[in-house]
């Protein structure tokens, strides 16, 4: 891979990381990293369980706001 191609790839990866962070899409990845660090003795929730838990919490902790 040429130097220019590598720079473009690195920028793409950085923009992708920022986009996932802003939209919340990377929340499961952050959870898994933290879980492995703090609880190495057992498996983290599956991605499906994680998003279901987040949805349940959002429904239980409803906040009236515009944004």
Image (spheres, helix red, strand yellow):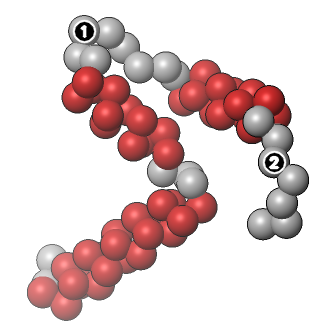
**Residue 13 to residue 45: above or below:** below
- Tell me where residue 24 appears, x and y as whole percent: 57, 54
Mark 2 highlights which residue? 63
- Neighbour class for label 2 at 10 Å: few (<14), some, many (≥20)? few
* Disc nearest the viewer among 1 and 2: 2
What residue is shown at x 78% (from left), y 66% (from top)? 67
Image-quadrant location for residue 8: bottom left
Badge 1 marks a residue whose secondary structure is loop
For this view, does 27 lie left or right of residue 53?
left
Number of other residues with Cα within 10 Å of mark 1, as a class: few under 14, some 14 to 19, many 20 or more: few
Q: Which residue is mark 1?
A: 41
Residue at screen point 40% across, 64% down: 17
Residue 5 x %, y %: 23, 84
- Horizontal and vertical percent position of residue 37: 23, 29
Q: In the image shown, does 13 or 64 lie closer to the viewer? A: 64
Question: Is residue 34 shown left or right of residue 57?
Answer: left
Q: Tell me where residue 22 appears, x and y as whole percent.
A: 54, 65
The image shows residue 19, relative to residue 1, as above or below, that is above
Residue 23 at least partly seen: yes
Q: Is residue 1 left or right of residue 20?
A: left
């Amino acid at each position: 891979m040429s130097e220019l191609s590598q720079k473009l790839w690195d920028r793409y990866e950085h923009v992708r990381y920022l986009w996932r962070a802003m939209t919340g899409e990377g929340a499961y990845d952050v959870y898994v990293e933290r879980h492995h660090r703090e609880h190495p003795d057992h498996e983290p929730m599956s991605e499906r369980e994680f998003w279901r838990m987040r949805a349940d919490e959002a429904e239980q902790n409803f906040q009236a706001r515009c944004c």
